[in-house]
Image: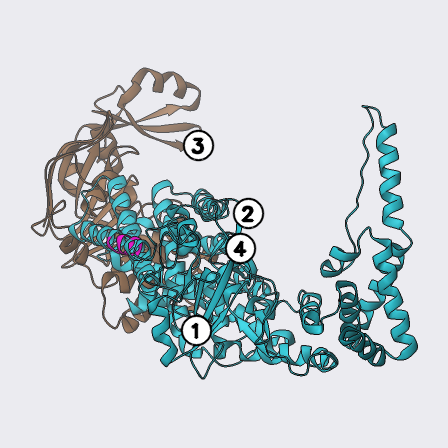
Amino acid sequence: MGLLGWIEVKAVVKQPAWILLAAFSAWVFWERLIPAIRLESPLVGPMLPLSSLGEWSRAMLLALETWGGVMFAPVIVLLATGSFSSELGHQEVLLSTQRGSSLQLAGAKLMAITSIATFLIVIGAGVAVLNFSIRGTMVPAGWQYIPLYLAFTWIRITVWVALTMFFFSLIRSRWGATAIVVALQLAAYMIATQGRMSSFRELLHINLLSWNFVSPFAPLGIIPTAFFLQGLLMAGLVIVLLGASLWVRWRLLGWQVSTSTKGAFVLGVLLAAGTGGAIIWELQNQIAPFTVTELWAERATLDRPYIWSKDFRHLVFPGEYIAVRLPVGAPLPAWVEKWTATKDLHRYDNVGAMILEKDAMEPLAPQSLILIHSLEHPYPPELEGMVRRFRHEIQTLLERAQIWREEVKIIFAWPGEAFFFRDIFSTTEGLLVPVSLLSEPDLWPWPFVWALTATSGLDELAKCYLSMYLMAGRYIEEVTGVLAWLHEEAEGQPLRKLEQARQALERIDERETIRITMGCSGPAVLCRYVHMKPEAARRILDHWKQGEAMGHENYIRSLLEGRRG
Amino acid sequence: MIQAEALTKNYGSVQALRGVHLAIEGGVFGLLGPNGAGKTTFIRILATLLPPTSGKASVFGYDVVHDRIPIRKMLGYLPQEFGAYPKLTGREYLAYIAALKGVRRPEREIERLLSQFGLTQIARRRVTSYSGGMLRRLGIAQALLGSPKVLLVDEPTGGLDPEERVRFREFLMGLGGERVVVLSTHLVEDVAMACDRLAVLNQGEIVYQGRTRGLIELFQGQVYEVEVPEEEVGEKLAAWGKRVLTTQRRDASRAVRLLGEVEGGRPVTPSLEDAYLALIRS
């Protein structure tokens, strides 16, 4: 097996397809194009940050799913079919040898192709470390998971290779087999991105694509048994496909199928069916017998940490970092209270809302969020680099906010990962910052500074001014743009455009079309109060002018004193 | 050593082999027949690549249907259309086949075979760069890996230039001894040079088996040669029809060999080719 495998490796690396695979892998990891899959929504989330060795290796596994899988599959399948189609030229000699049609040779081919593909992906992913923005935040935490993720990456690739082997055995065409496997991968991805997770089939599918929602908060998945079972499921599928490939080959040659081939096939079927069934059982065991509406209406209690409600709303993020969603005012369940002795437990009321109706954004109900973590680590060590960068980024903003808020505690909340939750909430303890925002620095400054103004006690327009003041400390070019936009709003330009559009609409006859864009071009948090409101824009500009005349700090203090007066 | 009893093979409605009975002992054995006679099908059944439709075949007592692995362990096979693993060098390919044959520590044997078949100089080159002759030599080298007791060689000289063909026949002549070598070919010269015994397969049936010399003796006194002027050749050949065995140009005439007496002809000692053609046409 060893020598056969080695010779197959040499044959595989003589194909130019490997260069394509390495280059593609390098591009994907350099650009961090690996989408994360969220618990609450089957749609893919933001790109992974690659902020730790754990995340880096986990990304290799996840890169093979979703659209990454659609892109990686053709290259890996090309590599595999190159090896299989070479067989056609010397098939007769091959089959006349004692091991030529054995599981051993098929296994050696499978292992050689998979090992090379895995190696190339690792090499490509290694290039990411040369990217300064990745290297700057990467920490060694999570390194201990590297062998496990690589092993599962290897197993995941064997499924493609075995699938290719099967279809190649069946149709004896390199391009035909490639097309079928790629089409299957594409279909799997397309199905996964249809709608929200509102049925068990979709939950199961997303669970498989996300490898049981692995993340820095749950490196072994939210149900570790399901995570490991998935590895076994893949191994079972590979054995089934290996057996089926040999079965097909023998039958096409007119021979009876050997006992070892039949045995492998049956073993694979049993393993795949057994592990598949066990995964389904594990997931079903985590689904509550009540809907979220029943829980919110207090017709049911969260008597154990069910991950999902009966209608597939996410309730509990389990593991070392626990997050629980409850109706505002609901008592803590007993199983949560038991953690108070050994863990850090925090409850935040009115942070976000629960969607009560399946497949609809309304009605929403306010929720409480309970976060439970170890006393030492309020967030996983894998996030250390990102948190450090985040703190560095916000340091100027916090210092400037000291005029009205002396100390601002930052609480990192993982509902962002778990619940597709993106707002920053100002709580009595501090600012609740979703962890997902750490990986997207371009998105957070305005919502963050807006949240910082929450405790100023000033009116909304003054808070808009405070937000601009905070931003001016670090992102002056942003403020320049906002001032220009405020002037446009103050002069009523958007209103005039609206009026012109209305007049144009009155003149329009049936043959004409008119395109009107009336979107707000300012920061979202300010648009709410300023867009189409010239008076409000003028008020903010007045604040800004007085701030510049008096010195912003002096002016803000006077505003705060006025509030007290 | 190799036995076939009432062996048949059908491809749909086409009968490739029709109740073949054959016994092959040691040495180089020729399996001669025209294209489409069923030679390759017979060889593939012996190589355990094809199952027979009915009848039995065995190699050293092992049944080709039920004992495929023991047969493969003692088998070397050079197929009619030999192609090696294109990504590998000659040496790598031999190492690969050695591994598939379960040959332990094959390095010395590989070097010996490379040297024996004049491949040492090109052993580091990819097999895709080999000429037809080089590829055939690599093919026979791979077939001999593991010192097989049975060697099946199917049309080994087809497509080779005359020099390579002569060279290849010389290789084959040296391969007999304790080993059973079955040489399947439609070229009479291959068998004439290399085989003591042969079988002639025509339209899926064995029409002769025995000593090579015996086939010639079978037609002793029945082959006549006649000189025909060039301008009469067309007319005469048409008149003699299937009796004509061979023709040979001689200045302004042709020497025509025929089966059976002919006016103006003289009896000649038949060559193997004469005897083979006479057998096929009779």
Which numbered dot is residue B251? Answer: 3
| Left or right position of B193 against A378 | left
Q: CA distance from mark 1 to mark 2?
A: 28 Å
First of labels 1, 2 by sequence position: 2
Letter of the brown chain: B
**Do the numbered discs 3 and 4 sit on residues whose CB atoms are within 8 Å?**
no
Residue toward you, B173 or B8: B8
Are discs 1 and 2 both within one chain?
yes
Camera-near label (1 vs 4) is 1
Q: Which residue is mark 1?
A: A372
* A508 relative to A320 in the view: left or right: right
Q: Which mark is residue A44?
A: 4
Q: Which image quarter: residue A425?
A: bottom right
In the image, is A452 to the left or to the right of B83?
right
Magenta region, residue range: A274-280
Measured as percent of width and height from the top left, residue A412 is found at 54, 73
Q: Secondary structure at mark 4?
A: strand
Marks 2 & 3 on one chain: no
Q: CA distance from mark 2 to mark 3?
A: 102 Å
Q: Residues within 10 Å of mark 2 (few under 14, many from 20)?
A: few
**Mark 3 and mark 1 on one chain:** no
| Residue B146 percent coordinates (x, y) | 22, 64
A116 or B276, which is in the foreground? Answer: A116
B87 displayed left or right of B36: right
Q: Amino acid at mark 2?
A: Met
Subunit under mark 2: A
In the foreground, A22 or A312: A312
Q: Position of residue A457 (x, y in %)?
A: 71, 71
Residue B95 among those drawn in magenta: no
Q: Earlier in the sequence, mark 1 or mark 4?
A: 4
What hue represents chain A?
Answer: cyan
